[in-house]
Image: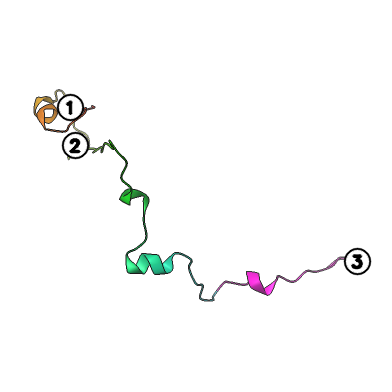
Amino acid sequence: MRRGSKRTLPSPKFLTVGKSQQRVDGEHKVSGKAIFAADRRIEDMAWGKVLRSPYSHARITQIDLSKARRVPGVLAVLT
C-alpha cells in the first residue's frame, strides 16, 4: 500500500458471497403465483411458430402453403 492512501473496508451489507439470500420473488415462484411474460394475454394477440427443416443442409425447392393458409385462425404464413 502506498504511503498516505487509505484502505476502505466493504460494508457488511454488501458481503453476500456464500450466504443465503432471501429472494424478493421467491415465494411467488414456488407457490405458482408469479406472473411471467409468457403468461400475459393481450386483446387480439397473435402467436407465431417457427418450423425448421429436419434436414440441416437440404435445399428447399418448393413449399406448398395452401393447407397452412386454410387453417382457421391463421393470419399469415411466412417463408
Which image quarter is the C terminus in? top left
Q: Nearer the viewer, residue 79 or 53?
A: 79
For disc 2, the marked residue is 53
Range covered by the magenta-colored residues: 1-17
For disc 3, the marked residue is 4
Q: Nearer the viewer, residue 63 or 76?
A: 76
Residue 52 in magenta stretch: no
Q: Amino acid at mark 2?
A: Ser
- Identify the mark nearer the N-term, 2 or 3: 3
Q: CA distance from mark 1 to mark 2?
A: 9 Å
| Disc 2 packing (10 Å; few <14; some 14–19; many ≥20) | few
Secondary structure state at the residue bearing disc 2:
loop
| Disc 3 packing (10 Å; few <14; some 14–19; many ≥20) | few
Q: Residue at x 10, y 24 (%)?
A: 66
Look at the magenta stretch and give its main secondary structure: loop
For disc 1, the marked residue is 60
Q: Quadrant of residue 3?
A: bottom right
